[in-house]
Image (cartoon, helix red, strand yellow):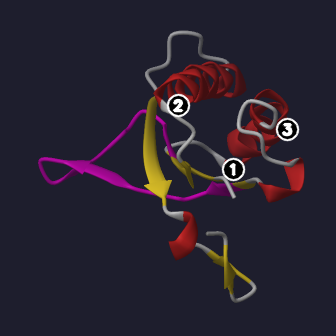
Amino acid sequence: MPHFRCRAMTPAQVQALSTPLVDALAELMNSPRAHFTIEHIPATFFVDGQVSPAYPFVEVLYFDRGQEVQNDIAKRVTQLVRDAMAKPEQDVAVIFTTLTPSDYYDNGAHYG
């Protein structure tokens, strides 16, 4: 925990993102490197019955750390995705899902 799910990026781009993402966020999120999960999710997007390109978006599943930290995470993730794609003006969506510690289990035990 935290979990990052990346769509509309290539596996190589997500792989390139994985180290700088953890470097940039481990301290901010007060989470050890080993607790981060970074996932590439293949996806096909459609508009009006046609396959359509999409801009990348990153889902962040995490325990709430307050709005200020969330804003900082979104800014850093956006810049890191742009860097990984070598596209400085790339649109990037970052979507947060806040998990409740008592609903999150690891090896049969919850965090709360």
Tell me which label, 1 or 3, sits earlier in the chain. Answer: 1
**In whole angstroms, how far apart are the C-alphas of marks 2 and 1?**
25 Å
Name the amino acid, label 1.
Pro
Q: Nearer the viewer, residue 104 or 56?
A: 104
Specify the segment rendered in magenta: 38-59
Name the amino acid, label 3.
Thr
Direction from residue 43 to residue 82 in the image, left or right: right
Hey, which quadrant is residue 21 in on the image? top right
Residue shown at 70% from the left, 43% from the top: 14
Which callout, 2 or 1, points to the residue nearer the camera? Answer: 2
Query: Which residue position holds label 2?
Result: 70
Q: How many residues crowd mark 3 within 10 Å: few (<14), some (14–19), many (20+)?
A: few
Query: Which residue position holds label 1?
Result: 11
Q: Position of residue 57 (x, y in %)?
A: 47, 39
Q: Position of residue 49 (x, y in %)?
A: 15, 54
Residue shown at 48% from the left, 36% from the top: 56
Q: Which mark is residue 19?
A: 3
Tell me which label, 2 or 1, sits earlier in the chain. Answer: 1
Q: Nearer the viewer, residue 98 or 101?
A: 101
> Which residue lies most toward the top here?
89
Name the amino acid, label 2.
Gln
> Which residue lies most toward the left here?
48
Q: Position of residue 91 (x, y in %)?
A: 43, 21
Q: Nearer the viewer, residue 105 or 33?
A: 105
